[in-house]
Amino acid sequence: METTGVLNRVKSELKIMEVCGTHSEVISKYSLRQYYTGKVKLISGPGCPFCVLPPEHIDLVIEYARCGFTIATFGDLIRISGTVSSLSVERAMGRKVGVVYSPLEALDVAKSDPSSQVIFVGVGFETTAPLVALTIMKAKEEGIKNFSVLSLHRTMPQILRKLFETDVKLNGLILPGHVCTIIGSRPFEFLAREFGKTCVVTGFTPEDVIESIEIIQQNLHKPSIHIQYKRAVSPYGNIVAQRLMERVFEPCDILWRGFGLVQNSGLAIKKEWSFFDAKKRWPIELKYPQKHTDKGCKCGDIMKGILTPLECGLFKTSCNPENPIGPCMVSSEGACAIYYKYGG
């Protein structure tokens, strides 16, 4: 696709943020930042589901492990540090911490060992929440008594509202294709209506990203929401998946790393399913003071688009994949890990 002519007509460099870790990887892997040098600045936002977890939530999971619960969760969460430890450290000390690839696998763990109370740590955006809802429904249907979920799920529209309420300077957004397969494009229409931004729901090839940048460029004068990823996304999304979420979850306020408490941006388990809600069934208090020291980590500012990984003084020095200080270097979807692997 020919983009040079259009981009050359722009007097100043466009600033476009992608809010999906997979898009961040595509952009770095195929050197799209270098391709657009001087024309478009591509900025990574809060698109990594593990990176947005604040230390408080890691501490809570660790405390459950220390209290004897079996923790089942996705692999990236294991290495992210809380205030004083990480799940990988706790596992090395004998705590029961296991990696699973789906909540249904965690349910199987509970069924295979009825003497153990299994807590599945639900992490992710709208993409993962429907299957977690289905798993809770299945646990109830099968009468599984030793399974519960710690819901740390977050939703994408409200964090983008929070992002623009901070007066971030962006011309447009590359919206997450995976999330939009579930919720569609309509929940993002406020970005055009209220904040005057042009945004594109985008697929995951370099051609998809280039086409989406072209769409943003052509529609700067007309704030609007577009679907480039039409082969998988519709304005209304997946109604069946949405109904599953709505049956089990309800919006709640939740903490985000770098953003603080964001209203209605989390998914809490509804009262009727509270038997499977770890927070309500097994209320727990942290037994040590939470003195959060960031050790110079800039993950929060990176996800807000204030800094790039290259502007963090720890990047590639004291912070690297073998010795990650912040979550953006831990997760394969984190901006720092992606920059480390492919370059800026």
Image: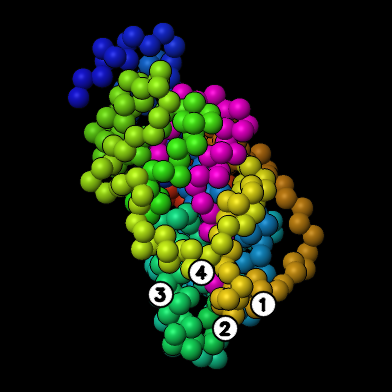
Q: Which residue is mark 4?
A: 248
Say if residue 244 shows up in the picture. yes
Q: Is residue 258 above or below residue 2?
A: below
| Badge 1 amino acid | Trp
- Asked if disc 1 and disc 2 are in contact, CB closer than 8 Å, the reply is yes
The magenta segment is 149-176
| Badge 4 amino acid | Val
Closer to the camera: disc 3 or disc 4? 4
Disc 3 is placed on an element classified as helix
Q: Is residue 171 magenta?
A: yes
Disc 1 is placed on an element classified as loop
Disc 2 is placed on an element classified as loop
Residue at image position (53%, 81%) is 147
Q: Which residue is mark 3?
A: 104
Q: Residues within 10 Å of mark 3 (few under 14, many from 20)?
A: some
Please tell me which of labels 3 and 1 falls first in the chain. Answer: 3
Q: Which residue is mark 2?
A: 117
Quadrant of residue 15 within the rendered picture: top left
In the rendered image, residue 90, in percent from the top left (x then y), is placed at 60, 69
| Badge 3 amino acid | Leu
In the rendered image, residue 145, in percent from the top left (x then y), is placed at 54, 87
Left or right side of 171 for 23: left
Residue at image position (46%, 24%) is 171
Left or right side of 286 for 178: left
Disc 4 is placed on an element classified as helix
Instruction: Tell me how far mark 1 sits from mark 2, CA to CA.
Output: 10 Å
Closer to the camera: disc 2 or disc 3? 3
Please tell me which of labels 2 and 4 falls first in the chain. Answer: 2
In the rendered image, residue 221, in percent from the top left (x then y), is placed at 40, 18
